[in-house]
Image (cartoon, rainbow, N blue to C red):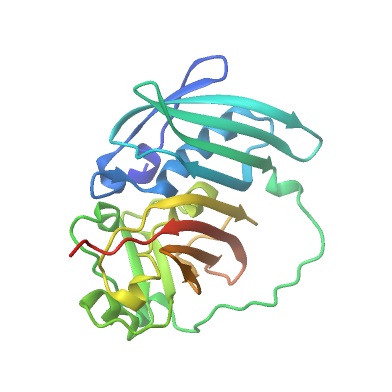
Amino acid sequence: MGLFQQETQIEKVADNRWLSAFSDNWCIGDVPNGGYIMAIAAKVLSEALPHKDPLSVSAFYMAPTQVGPVECDVEELRSGGSTSFAMVRMYQQGELKVQVTAAFTDFERVQGVTQQLVQPATTLSSEDCVLLSPPPHVKLARHVNLWVIPGQELCMLGKPQGEGRWDGWIDFRDGNPVDPFALLCFSDAFPPPAFTYFGPTGWVPTVELTVQVRARPAPGPIQCQFTSRMMTDGITEEDGIMWDSEGKLVAISRQTAKFRLPKQ
């Protein structure tokens, strides 16, 4: 069992109630990463619902979380033949911190037309890309490999390129298998694309994150692209696309975040 599997474990303690704990290993500074939090919420819903695979998951981060125990209360909204809908509310010390609404399905039963108009942005393999070195306070980056196409790494060295995107690959350093729950974590694991404009500076808290999972990924690293095209009064979007090692689209994401430069 890899570190991510170990530190996203859940325990049922009552009807519609689960416990887990946020680990320091997946923090940005002292705050657990939003994708990591979403992965724990999704594991709770997977256990609670008749359908086991996350199809679309949306999280609202209402208050900063912290390392330590978290209580997860589930409300099932509807279960049909192929899809279940539910909500999970995540509490710490009695305060509602995160609310997640999701649709779940069973990927083995999903079938239909496939059309993919957006292709991976690079033909480079992970071995041909450059491993990013995020700042020391990004503890999550100690446990994942973040590769980018040559030249983009300069953004994290104080030489922003102004492209508003990352193109590269991601996987776990310890070989933890990449499953649909890992994709939720990976959706928020790269540095904010805003750093390609401003360098590795400021604070970029996530307000809302939605991830649509399309398939269970094939073994191997995940190819990805994350972009931010617009910023308005310090509010920005981040769009993500992820393909598995065989080139199949496995997830897309969008988040709303605030960008705050350090006070002078």
Give the position of the C terminus as an image quadrant: bottom left
- Residue 200 on image: x %, y %: 26, 69
Residue 27 vs residue 104: left or right?
A: left
Q: Is residue 129 left or right of residue 214?
A: left
Residue 186 in the image: x percent, y percent?
44, 57
Between residues 262 and 113, which one lies in front from this camera angle?
A: 262
Does 96 appear above or below 15? below
Q: Tell whether 15 sits left or right of 35.
A: right
Residue under the point 46% across and 38% down: 40
Query: Residue shown at 25%/83% (left/top)?
Result: 159
Along the line of sight, which residue is nearer the eye, 163 or 178? 163
The residue lying toward the viewer, choosing from 246 and 87, is: 87
Is 241 above or below relative to 25? below
| Image location (x, y in percent) of residue 24 | 25, 41
Residue 24 in the figure: left or right of residue 84: left
- The answer to whether residue 190 of the structure is visible from this angle is yes
Task: Give residue 93's quadrant in the image.
Answer: top left
Task: Tell me, yes or no, if residue 243 can be seen here.
Answer: no
Instruction: Assign the N terminus to one quadrant of the image.
Output: top left
